[in-house]
Image: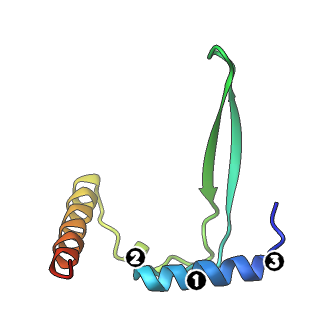
Amino acid sequence: MSDKTVKDILAEHRAWNIKQGFEHVDNLSYLYWIGKFHKDPPGSRFICGVAQPAQPSKQEKKAPQNTVQAILLERSTYLRTAQHQLLFI
């Protein structure tokens, strides 16, 4: 529950995405609760998901075609970001 409107939440999310250099999609996530009754004491698991936007984003259009390409792309992006951040410490 929140006392913020959907429009307010999406505006905050948009500002954060822009600050972090991510593309923003006006879409709220949803949350599932799953009981873990096999545990003693019983526990909870929460799974978050997002509905597919109406049109693919620029990142999705440029998405690698296989898992190995995706892993290598993510690693190189992380390394570039980490090196950039070290320069400003």
User: Which residue is most to the front?
Assistant: 89
> Relative to 18, is 82 above or below?
above
Q: Residue at x 52, y 79 (%)?
A: 16
Q: Disc 1 residue type?
A: Arg
Q: Residues within 10 Å of mark 1 (few under 14, many from 20)?
A: some
Position in image of residue 87 (x %, y %): 15, 80
Position in image of residue 25 (x %, y %): 58, 78
Q: Disc 3 residue type?
A: Thr
Q: How is the image coloured?
A: rainbow
Q: Nearer the viewer, mark 3 or mark 2?
A: 3
Q: Residue at x 66, y 84 (%)?
A: 11
> Relative to 79, is 68 above or below?
above
Q: Of the numbered discs in the image, which one, if any, rests on residue 38?
A: none
Q: Residue at x 23, y 76 (%)?
A: 85
Label 2 with label 1: CB-CB less than 8 Å: no
Q: Nearer the viewer, residue 75 or 66?
A: 75
The tag earlier along the polypeptide, 1 or 3, is: 3
Q: Residues within 10 Å of mark 3 (few under 14, many from 20)?
A: few
Quarter occupied by the C terminus: bottom left
User: What residue sits right under mark 2 in the picture?
Assistant: 59
Q: Secondary structure at mark 2?
A: helix
Position in image of residue 76 (x %, y %): 18, 67
User: What residue sits right under mark 3 in the picture?
Assistant: 5
Q: Nearer the viewer, residue 86 or 78?
A: 86
Residues at marks 1 and 3, CA–CA distance in whole angstroms: 14 Å
Q: Secondary structure at mark 1?
A: helix
Position in image of residue 2 (x %, y %): 81, 66
Residues at marks 3 and 2, CA–CA distance in whole angstroms: 28 Å
Residue 46 picture quarter:
top right
Q: Secondary structure at mark 3?
A: loop
Q: Residues within 10 Å of mark 2 (few under 14, many from 20)?
A: few
User: What residue sits right under mark 1 in the picture?
Assistant: 14
